[in-house]
């Protein structure tokens, strides 16, 4: 028997062997639902060459473009990772000690708990209230000398609520005084209204705060696995000690740069998606469904006894993949249907049929 860390016996992972590239409508993982414009794609294909594949990647152009995109003075506060999932893991690498505690909300992104178990820490959660918000005061009451990390997904996955910075200020101040690192997971921040403040620069104002973003959601690059972390120089010095040899691949870096160079396409997608979501929430409610909207690119719908019919309708469409069985706090029904939203979704035949069966 090989020696290993026995505490990982409690970790159970599931590998999904399902090629989704052939599905026209991928409603299960919050990906971009429509193709990029043909010119965008053709221009990218014209820009790549063999050197992007046979040489080690050059990523500094992407860091400079990110700094310009976010109006940073330099690239010192940017740390690239192959997807924001590795940003989360990096925070555990740097800060989480065995037998310490990690605090987040309930529910949350499942990988928070997976990493907490892998790093032999106590996983503690602040529950959502009946109005689908969580209490910052309750979270602060849970902080103690054994807290090694706090993670807040803002907007939250899977609920979709969003907390403005002004409500987080006292929390940032207290955790900074206690020396507790905070990760603000902003995977879906772009879908929040433009005039609402992000936590992206909180790491420049508070010594303990790190923010992470991804190219997988609003930016439409889930397949390239590119994410980034933003914080102050001291935090970046610590985090960079765990940098892998080459953060991302050359083709991925070039595609991410191409997205930033054509960000008007992303902004149009965000605008159209948010409009589509508002209309879908209205139409599903009008049809008699319980609906939860939120600030991300999905909705939850529940038709109670008709939920089996929802799945039966969607199963008739071989080009559609979806996520059923979602659970919402304070709701005993475990069969909510979570549906990724994108432009023109209302025009599909399967959505029209879902609206008709109630």
Image (cartoon, helix red, strand yellow):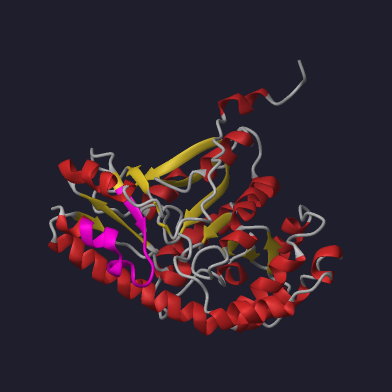
* 350 in the magenta segment: yes
Dividing the picture into quadrants, the one containing residue 145 is top right
Q: Is residue 187 visible?
A: yes
Span of residues in magenta: 337-353
Image x and y of residue 247, in percent: 75, 60
Q: In the image, is residue 52 above or below residue 357?
A: below
* 100 in the magenta segment: no
> For this view, does 123 lie left or right of residue 207?
left
Residue for point 56% across, 55% down: 182
Tell me the quarter of the image containing the N terminus.
top right
Q: In the image, is residue 215 above or below residue 262?
A: above
Q: Nearer the viewer, residue 65 or 350?
A: 350
Image x and y of residue 277, in percent: 31, 68
Image x and y of residue 284, in percent: 20, 61
Image x and y of residue 32, in percent: 48, 66
Residue for point 43% across, 75% down: 270
> For this view, does 39 lie left or right of residue 164?
right
> For this view, does 190 lie left or right of residue 260?
left
Q: Nearer the viewer, residue 188 or 102?
A: 188
Q: Nearer the viewer, residue 134 or 244?
A: 244
Dividing the picture into quadrants, the one containing residue 214 is bottom right
């Amino acid at each position: 028997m090989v020696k290993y860390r026995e505490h990982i016996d409690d970790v159970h992972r599931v590998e999904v062997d399902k090629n989704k590239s052939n599905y026209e409508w991928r409603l299960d993982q919050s990906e971009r639902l429509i193709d990029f414009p043909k010119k965008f794609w053709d221009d990218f294909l014209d820009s790549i060459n063999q050197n992007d594949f046979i040489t080690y990647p050059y990523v500094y152009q992407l860091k400079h473009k990110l700094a310009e995109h976010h109006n940073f003075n330099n690239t010192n506060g940017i740390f690239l990772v192959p997807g924001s999932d590795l940003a989360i893991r990096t925070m555990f690498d740097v800060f989480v000690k065995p037998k310490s505690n990690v605090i987040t909300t309930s529910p949350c992104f499942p990988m928070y708990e997976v990493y907490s178990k892998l790093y032999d820490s106590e996983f503690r959660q602040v529950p959502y209230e009946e109005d689908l918000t969580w209490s910052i005061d309750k979270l602060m009451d849970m902080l103690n000398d054994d807290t090694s990390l706090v993670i807040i997904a803002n907007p939250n996955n899977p609920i979709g609520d969003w907390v403005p910075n002004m409500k987080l200020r006292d929390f940032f101040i207290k955790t900074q005084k206690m020396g507790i690192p905070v990760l603000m997971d902003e995977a879906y921040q772009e879908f929040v209204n433009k005039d609402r403040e992000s936590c992206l620069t909180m790491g420049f104002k508070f010594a303990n705060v790190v923010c992470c973003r991804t190219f997988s959601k609003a930016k439409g690059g889930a397949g390239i696995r590119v994410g980034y972390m933003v914080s102050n120089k001291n935090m970046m010095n610590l985090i960079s000690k765990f940098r892998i040899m080459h953060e991302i691949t050359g083709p991925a870096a070039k595609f991410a740069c191409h997205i930033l160079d054509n960000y008007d396409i992303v902004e149009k997608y965000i605008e159209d998606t948010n409009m589509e979501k508002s209309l879908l929430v209205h139409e599903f409610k009008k049809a008699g469904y319980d609906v939860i909207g939120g600030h991300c690119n999905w909705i939850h719908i529940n038709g109670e006894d008709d939920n089996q019919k929802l799945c039966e309708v969607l199963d008739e469409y071989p080009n559609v993949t979806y996520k059923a069985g979602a659970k919402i706090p304070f709701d005993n029904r475990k069969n909510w249907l979570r549906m990724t939203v994108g432009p023109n979704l209302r025009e599909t035949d399967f959505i029209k049929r879902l609206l008709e069966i109630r």
